[in-house]
Amino acid sequence: MIARIETHRGSITDLNVDAIVNAANASLLGGGGVDGAIHRAAGPELLEECRTLGGCATGDAKITKGYHLKAKFVIHAVGPVWQGGGDLGEAELLASCYRRSLELTREYKLKSIAFPAISTGVYGYPLEEATRIAIDTVRNWLIGSTALERVVFVCFDERTLSTYERLLRDHD
Ligand code: APR
């Protein structure tokens, strides 16, 4: 059964899914944007657990509990900083964030996951290209076996939402 892919306009901290993905930095010690919002909503125990993880490489993802969030787990993914596109590694590193996060849902037998638009904020990744990578990577991964029933792309602003909805339609 192929999981349902949805978009949602709003804050990822409001979602009642098994895991929400955090657009974190390599230290995993919090930050601004969605990272700040998730830590604020989860409470201080999240940072305490993050401290035990010893950071996270760009393109990789690590899982923690969700604490005061509705979500049971937080998957912290570290996206690439946009360097202008010359360094081909950016696209692969961004795709890897989505793949590693999805692999963790398999490991933990999760049924639902929500992603923010990783790297498209502070990290400056062009929205159109990042959205294409997100959708293609998730769709390709879902072809394999998975217990996942629901993948939500959470868009914090109208521009992001309309980009996701257009590219999801185009691919149909
Ligand atoms: N819920 C969902 N999405 C959100 C939220 C929220 N509460 N707050 C911000 N966003 C959106 C942004 O609008 C953007 O579309 O998340 C997307 C990613 O933006 P950032 O949070 O800036 O993340 P990123 O570009 O990956 O940069 C990561 O920023 O906060 C620091 O510690 C973090 O150093 C890391 C860097």
Image: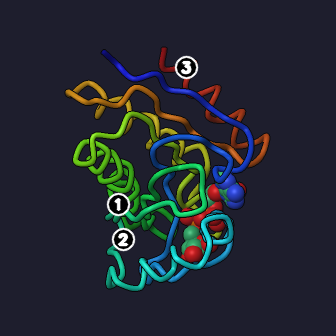
The amino acid type of the residue labelled 3 equals Asp
| 3 or 2: mark nearer the eye | 2
Mark 3 vs mark 2: which is more N-terminal?
A: 2
- Assess whether mark 1 and mark 2 are in contact (beta carbons under 8 angstroms): yes
- Is 158 or 108 nearer to us in this picture? 108
Q: Residue at x 64, y 63 (%)?
A: 34
Give the spatial CA distance, label 1 vs label 3.
Answer: 24 Å
The amino acid type of the residue labelled 2 equals Thr
Task: Please name the residue that numbered disc 1 is placed on.
Answer: 93
- Is 112 or 165 nearer to us in this picture? 112
Place of residue 166 in the rendered image (x, y in percent of width and height, measured from the top left): 64, 26
Place of residue 149 in the rendered image (x, y in percent of width and height, measured from the top left): 40, 26
Q: Residue at x 28, y 34 (%)?
A: 141
Is ligand 1 within 8 Å of the beta carbon of the residue shown at mark 2?
no
Give the spatial CA distance, label 3 vs label 2.
Answer: 29 Å
Place of residue 142 in the rendered image (x, y in percent of width and height, measured from the top left): 31, 29
Task: Please name the residue that numbered disc 3 is placed on.
Answer: 170
Residue 73 sits above or below residue 56 on the image: above
Q: Determine the secondary structure under disc 3.
A: helix
Q: Determine the secondary structure under disc 2.
A: loop
Task: Please name the residue that numbered disc 2 is placed on.
Answer: 58
